[in-house]
């Protein structure tokens, strides 16, 4: 058992009740230092504005490069690690904004000899929702769950 400093001893020893009197506990062991809790530190590119942190979307969506996008938003593409160009293609920045029903980008248009059928796309959310006025609401989320919204013409 492990107790924090100031934590109450809420368990009553077997055979005793709280009406039996005052319980006194004495520590008879050797203190073992605990490793400090790991503090979250964002990637070094986040404070510079090169990258943005986004939470994992509430629903998991995946698609191959041959099918149209099942949802609007940012999609991250990757190929099987055994693919000859996996080290070139599987990068954090290999993302595309694709609207629902549209085709995913074809890497052959960028000089990469990778068939769209070999690409697995994962939805990262970030859909720009259309407003009644026709403008789109651009939502950017971060891990602190603070939402910044700006309207784009």
Image (cartoon, grey):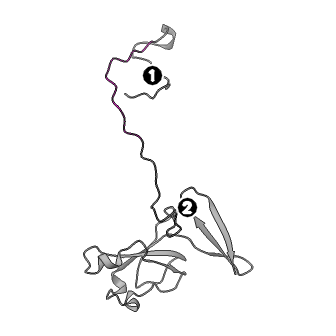
Q: Residue 82: x, y in percent?
A: 24, 75
Q: Which numbered tag is attached to residue 27?
A: none
Q: Is residue 134 above or below residue 6?
A: below
Which of discs 2 and 1 lies nearer the camera? The answer is 2
- The residue at the far front in this view is 48
Chain-order first, disc 2 or disc 1: 1
Q: Which residue is mark 2?
A: 142
On screen, 53 above or below 69? above
Measured as percent of width and height from the top left, residue 133 is found at 75, 79
Q: Quadrant of the N terminus?
A: top left
Image position, residue 100 (x, y; %):
54, 81
Measure the alpha-carbon separation of dots 2 and 1: 40 Å
Is 133 drawn above or below residue 125 in the view shown? below
Q: Secondary structure at mark 2?
A: loop
Q: Which residue is at a point 42% across and 46% down the rendered structure image? A: 38
Badge 1 marks a residue whose secondary structure is: loop
What residue span does the magenta drawing correspond to?
24-36
The dominant secondary structure in magenta is loop
Residue, far top = 21
Q: Which mark is residue 11?
A: 1
- Decide which of 128, 93 is in the foreground and name it: 93
Give yes or no for residue 55 being in the magenta stretch. Answer: no
The residue most toward the right is: 133
Callout 1 environment at 10 Å: few (<14), some (14 to 19), or many (20+)?
few
């Amino acid at each position: 058992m492990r107790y924090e400093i100031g934590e109450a001893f809420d368990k009553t020893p077997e055979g005793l009740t709280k009406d039996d009197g005052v319980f006194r506990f004495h520590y008879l062991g050797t203190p073992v230092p605990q490793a400090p809790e790991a503090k979250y530190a964002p990637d070094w590119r986040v404070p510079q504005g090169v990258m943005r942190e986004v939470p994992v979307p509430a629903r998991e969506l995946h698609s191959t490069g041959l099918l149209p996008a099942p949802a609007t938003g940012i999609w991250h593409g990757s190929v099987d690690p055994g693919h000859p160009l996996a080290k070139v293609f599987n990068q954090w920045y290999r993302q595309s904004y694709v609207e629902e029903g549209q085709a995913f980008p074809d890497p052959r248009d960028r000089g990469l000899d990778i068939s769209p059928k070999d690409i697995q796309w994962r939805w990262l959310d970030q859909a720009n929702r259309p407003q009644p006025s026709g403008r789109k609401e651009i939502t950017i989320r971060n891990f602190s769950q603070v939402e910044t919204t700006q309207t784009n013409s």
